[in-house]
């Protein structure tokens, strides 16, 4: 099991027994299920208590994609003040957060060797071919795209709606797990693209039908693997293509295709259609920039009474009263350090700080929040942080909150990218309101080690 799979499994153990607050709608679920249910790589940007709760009550328990996103209710700048302000009075619930629009792709795609009955598509400067009649495209960021068999999708959704209706007729309630999550997750024919700073092509299960290097103009590395997964949860033919543009990003193209010779031929056609339509410099110029962010100046060093730790090359320190939480992740987990503090966020929830190391794709997916600040850390090519206080008693989506109004919490994160290219660290915290001085002290202890 990969590190990311262990990470996801841990989150699911936390969420065991929690129920979604609203009935599941198969049409609303479909868009999520198509993109996320079957991904082998599960990328989780934060495992703070808030994120775990939010993930546990998400409709399909679809883990969010990695990327630098603003904190819920964000907007407060990191502060150097040492004063603790009283919790503000509860405000009226905000308007529901609108669904993010799809990004506008500035490139025109013309793939190589497009056969009859196929069409050119692309993502972030790399063109490929998929069959005519397939839908899809960029999702909600620059790092993910998906295309799928539209006719099969509609047929699967019709079957899911019928199954859900039969369950409601028999039991008088909605099913706990919507049928569409299963059928779309195991039977949909689709191709996905992941783009980022790092390569994350995981090994495929089953018998290898074909494996070879590819010649993709403009790439200094390209590799194809096609497998028959046999008895795994993915029937048909699976494939993965890893492409690195010279001087640019990694592109991972994978998916599920029909079984047998048809699927193998489709994988070969997709592999032979790959073509960059822009240079690495032109592609980078279209991505959101973080270089312009102001620097947050912090005192460096280990405060008295704090203890130094290391998580896969990220040095940090915490007060002696902080303890490792081993309910989900082992103390020696290679990629995750999950800590609990002595000061409670609520009467039943301790403050938390989690450090995760990953090599998964990561590029800026949207313009950073104006409150984001850069950090100066030796051995890091880029480090940023963002935090804000939020009232957990106000549901940002307009629903009812589990917490009483006025439950003020300090949420935040920091991202530290290693200069040697060996992945990055996501640090997330959920702390009592007024913990800004602690956060600044903690960030001042971070160092990237060899």
Image (cartoon, rainbow, N blue to C red):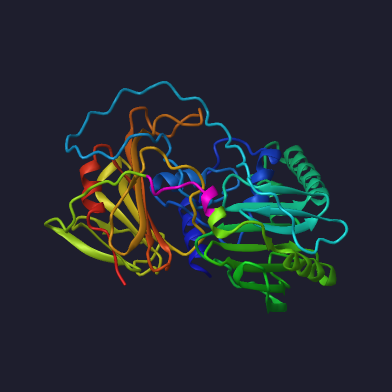
Q: Residue at x 31, y 56 (%)?
A: 339
The answer to whether residue 20 is seen in the rendering is yes
Q: Residue at x 32, y 52 (%)?
A: 353
Count of numbered circles on the image? 0
| Side of 94 relative to 228 (left or right) | left
Which sits in the foreground, 181 or 360? 360
In this view, the residue farthest toward the left is 304
| Side of 377 relative to 190 (left or right) | left
Q: Quadrant of residue 110?
A: bottom right
Q: Where in the figure is residue 281, as x and y percent of width and height? A: 53, 57
| Side of 143 relative to 237 (left or right) | left
**302 w.r.t. 438: above or below:** below
The answer to whether residue 64 is seen in the rendering is no
Which sits in the foreground, 219 or 172? 219
- Name the magenta segment's main secondary structure: loop
Q: Where in the figure is residue 143, as x and y percent of width and height? A: 57, 53
Q: Quadrant of residue 264?
A: bottom right
Extent of the magenta region? 284-292
| Side of 324 relative to 304 (left or right) | right
Q: Where in the figure is residue 325, as x and y percent of width and height? A: 33, 58
Which quarter of the rendered picture does the C terminus lie within?
bottom left
Q: Where in the figure is residue 365, as x and y percent of width and height? A: 51, 48
Q: Is 257 part of what is drawn in magenta? A: no
Which sits in the foreground, 434 or 191? 191
**351 w.r.t. 321: above or below:** above
In this view, the residue farthest toward the top is 92
């Amino acid at each position: 099991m990969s590190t990311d799979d262990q990470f996801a499994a841990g989150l699911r153990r936390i969420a065991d027994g929690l129920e979604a607050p609203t009935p599941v709608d198969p049409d609303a679920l479909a868009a999520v299920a198509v993109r996320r249910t079957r991904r082998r790589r599960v990328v989780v940007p934060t495992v703070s208590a808030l994120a775990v709760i939010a993930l546990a009550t998400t409709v399909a328990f679809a883990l969010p994609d990695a990327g630098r996103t603003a904190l819920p209710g964000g907007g407060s700048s990191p502060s150097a003040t040492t004063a603790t302000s009283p919790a503000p009075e509860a405000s009226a619930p905000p308007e529901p957060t609108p669904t993010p629009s799809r990004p506008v792709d500035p490139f025109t795609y013309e793939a190589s060797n497009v056969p009859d009955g196929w069409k050119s598509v692309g993502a972030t400067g790399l063109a490929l071919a998929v069959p005519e009649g397939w839908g899809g495209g960029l999702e909600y960021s620059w790092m993910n795209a998906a295309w799928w068999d539209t006719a099969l999708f509609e047929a699967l959704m019709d079957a899911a709606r019928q199954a859900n209706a039969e369950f409601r007729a028999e039991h008088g309630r909605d099913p706990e797990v919507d049928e569409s999550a299963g059928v779309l997750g195991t039977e949909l024919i689709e191709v996905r693209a992941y783009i980022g700073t790092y390569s994350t092509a995981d090994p495929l299960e089953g018998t290898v039908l074909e494996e070879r290097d590819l010649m993709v103009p403009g790439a200094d590395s390209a590799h194809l693997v096609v497998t028959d997964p046999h008895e795994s949860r993915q029937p048909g033919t699976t494939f993965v293509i890893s492409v690195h543009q010279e001087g640019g990003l990694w592109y991972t193209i994978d998916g599920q295709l029909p079984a047998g010779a048809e699927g193998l031929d489709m994988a070969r056609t997709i592999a032979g259609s790959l073509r960059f339509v822009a240079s690495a410099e032109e592609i980078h110029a279209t991505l959101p920039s973080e270089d312009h962010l102001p620097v947050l100046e912090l005192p460096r060093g280990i405060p008295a009474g704090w203890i130094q730790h290391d998580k896969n090359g990220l040095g940090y320190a915490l007060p002696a009263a902080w303890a490792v939480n081993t309910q989900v992740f082992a103390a020696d987990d290679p990629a995750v350090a999950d800590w609990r503090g002595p000061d409670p966020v609520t009467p039943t929830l301790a403050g938390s700080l989690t450090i995760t190391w990953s090599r998964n794709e990561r590029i800026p997916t949207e313009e950073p929040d104006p409150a984001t600040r850069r950090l100066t850390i030796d051995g890091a090519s880029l480090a940023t942080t963002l935090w804000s206080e939020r009232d957990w008693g106000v549901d940002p989506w307009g629903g009812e909150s589990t917490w009483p109004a006025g439950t003020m919490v300090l949420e935040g994160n920091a991202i530290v990218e290693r200069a040697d290219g060996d992945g990055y660290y996501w640090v997330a915290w959920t702390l009592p309101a007024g913990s800004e001085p602690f956060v600044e002290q903690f960030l001042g202890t971070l160092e990237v080690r060899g």
